[in-house]
Image (tube, rainbow, N blue to C red):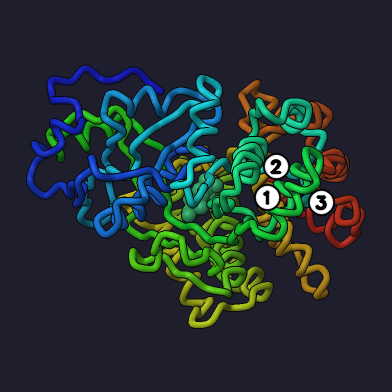
């Protein structure tokens, strides 16, 4: 976090909260009556903008669903929120921006500092749900989609299952403690942008548990509820401009407010069971058709976001809005959606895909939102397989051209090469490998593309060997020179 700006305003906290300026929405419930029913792993900006907002609405009807937020690594969120009694401000950006003080997070733990406190929450009878936003890399999956048992965190946790460091390790240890005392498992709700997120997580958790105790694994397999979900709300990172804006609007100083677009959506597979929070009552869609929503969002929104990020940065843009103001990129975004991605999708009931695509383009053109392309460009090696490669593979199988779908991949390669050559940091768990590949690149399409395609954690070997795919990539890479 950046240093706190010097401010004369009162700090946001339980006692000062009622003094917020008129028009600021306050928690509509008595926080002293709230109990913890949800543990959340990874309370980054997206969680605080999205799931915590839904629970903030729910608490007005049912005080059992307060959140214990657990940071798996850094103390930054706790350090900012503890002096604020875990309160923070959510700015919902629109033509008329609104400000809401969120009270649903009632406790923030930093796992490495106090693992027993985390286990106690996971094993508490009142805890019915564990939600996660740990980003794609936090699932520790291999490129085949299963648990990556060679991942250093998983290697560590398999040797020390009672002292885990990974999200998977914590989930399994929490479930083990419940199993031992005869408590039902908590529902595990993955809220990251992975295709079939809940299924993948269940497979990874069960595979890990099988290495710890086969009976535990069988119990998780039989009783565990891991709904697949689709989560959506554009959440630009917090900056000092937001801090200043929030202070002016609320009259209170908040060390870490959050901003997002006004639009928000949460679709959850309807397998949560009777003891689950009534999420439908606060606007969550419960459905047995989550895959249609999730594929459409991942490919149309996130796939095109990543395209705009890499192609946009190469063309000198800084934000999504700026990239969308560049006619070349605006056309590319629409053509990709309509001509290449929609043909790979099956529309969920009640969703018209062209209308959905147009609505996404409109969100990208929202002038109220300053969403940095650099933020979206992070972790490309983890994001591109779900966002672009799956659609591209299906297009290849159907015999369609993949010329345009190859553009975001080629742009990513050029982006990596450019940053590596300039000695700039690449934010990606594969950064070392990417820098090594980039060091061998000369700018010549055939050789450079071949070097990137050796990254088998990103490109499955069968795809890397497909001549139509390789030709499309080489052409796109050459065109971006
Ligand atoms: C973005 C997403 O940063 C990124 O990679 O594509 O965070 C995107 O803004 C959200 O998924 C929108 O729901």
Label ID, residue 381: 2
Q: Which residue is mark 1?
A: 384
The answer to whether one can see residue 114 in this image is yes
Q: Position of residue 447 (x, y in %)?
A: 87, 40
Residue at (78, 47) in percent of width and height: 207
Identify whether 215 is placed above or below 335. Answer: above
Nearer to us in this view, 182 or 67: 182
Q: Position of residue 368 (x, y in %)?
A: 30, 50
Name the secondary structure under disc 1.
helix
Could you give the CA–CA distance between mark 3 and mark 2, rounded to whole angstroms? 14 Å
Q: Nearer the viewer, mark 3 or mark 1?
A: 3
Residue at (45, 69) in percent of width and height: 285
**Other-residue count near label 2 (Cα within 10 Å), few / some / many at <14 / 14–19 / ≥20:** many
Contact between marks 2 and 1 (CB within 8 A): the answer is yes
Contact between marks 3 and 1 (CB within 8 A): the answer is no
Identify whether 346 is placed above or below 1. Answer: below
Could you give the CA–CA distance between mark 2 and mark 1, rounded to whole angstroms? 6 Å
Q: Nearer the viewer, mark 3 or mark 2?
A: 3
Name the secondary structure under disc 3.
loop
């Amino acid at each position: 976090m950046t240093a706190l700006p010097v401010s004369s305003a009162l700090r946001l906290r339980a006692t000062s909260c009622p003094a917020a300026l008129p028009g600021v929405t306050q928690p509509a419930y008595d926080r002293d009556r709230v109990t913890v029913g949800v543990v959340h792993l990874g309370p980054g900006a997206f969680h605080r903008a999205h799931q915590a907002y839904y629970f903030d609405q729910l608490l007005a009807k049912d005080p059992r669903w307060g959140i214990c937020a657990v940071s798996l690594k850094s103390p930054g969120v706790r350090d900012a929120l503890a002096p604020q009694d875990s309160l923070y401000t959510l700015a919902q950006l629109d033509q008329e921006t609104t400000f809401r003080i969120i009270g649903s997070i009632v406790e923030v733990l930093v796992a490495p500092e106090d693992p027993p406190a985390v286990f106690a929450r996971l094993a508490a009878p009142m805890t019915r749900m564990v939600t996660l936003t740990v980003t794609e890399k936090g699932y520790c999956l291999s490129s085949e989609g299963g648990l990556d048992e060679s991942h250093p965190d998983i290697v560590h946790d398999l040797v020390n299952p009672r002292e885990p460091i990974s999200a998977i390790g914590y989930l399994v240890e929490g479930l083990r403690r419940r199993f031992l005392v005869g408590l039902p498992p908590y529902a595990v709700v993955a809220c990251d942008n992975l295709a079939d997120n809940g299924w993948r997580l269940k497979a990874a958790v069960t595979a890990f548990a099988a290495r710890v105790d086969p009976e535990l694994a069988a119990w998780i397999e039989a009783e565990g509820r891991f709904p697949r979900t689709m989560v959506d709300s554009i959440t630009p990172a917090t900056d000092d401009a937001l801090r200043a804006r929030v202070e002016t609007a609320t009259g209170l100083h908040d060390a870490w407010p959050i901003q997002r677009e006004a639009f928000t959506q949460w679709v959850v597979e309807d397998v949560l069971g009777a003891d689950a929070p009534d999420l439908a009552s606060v606007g969550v869609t419960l459905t047995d058709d989550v895959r249609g929503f999730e594929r459409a969002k991942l490919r149309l929104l996130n796939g095109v976001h990543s395209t705009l990020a890499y192609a946009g940065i190469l063309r000198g843009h800084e934000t999504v809005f700026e990239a969308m103001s560049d006619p070349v990129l605006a056309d590319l975004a629409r053509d990709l959606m309509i001509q290449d991605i929609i043909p790979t999708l099956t529309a969920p009931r009640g969703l018209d895909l062209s209308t959905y695509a147009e609505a996404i383009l409109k969100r990208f053109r929202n002038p109220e939102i300053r969403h940095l392309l650099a933020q979206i460009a992070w972790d490309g090696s983890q994001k591109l397989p779900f966002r672009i490669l799956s659609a591209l593979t299906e297009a290849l199988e159907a015999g369609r051209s993949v010329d345009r779908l190859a553009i975001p991949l080629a742009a990513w390669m050029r982006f990596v090469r450019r940053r590596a050559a300039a000695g700039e940091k690449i934010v990606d768990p594969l950064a070392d490998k990417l820098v090594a590949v980039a060091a061998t690149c000369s700018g010549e399409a055939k050789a450079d593309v071949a070097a990137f395609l050796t990254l088998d954690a990103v490109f499955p070997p069968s795809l890397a060997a497909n001549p139509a795919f390789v030709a499309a990539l080489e052409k796109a890479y050459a065109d971006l020179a």
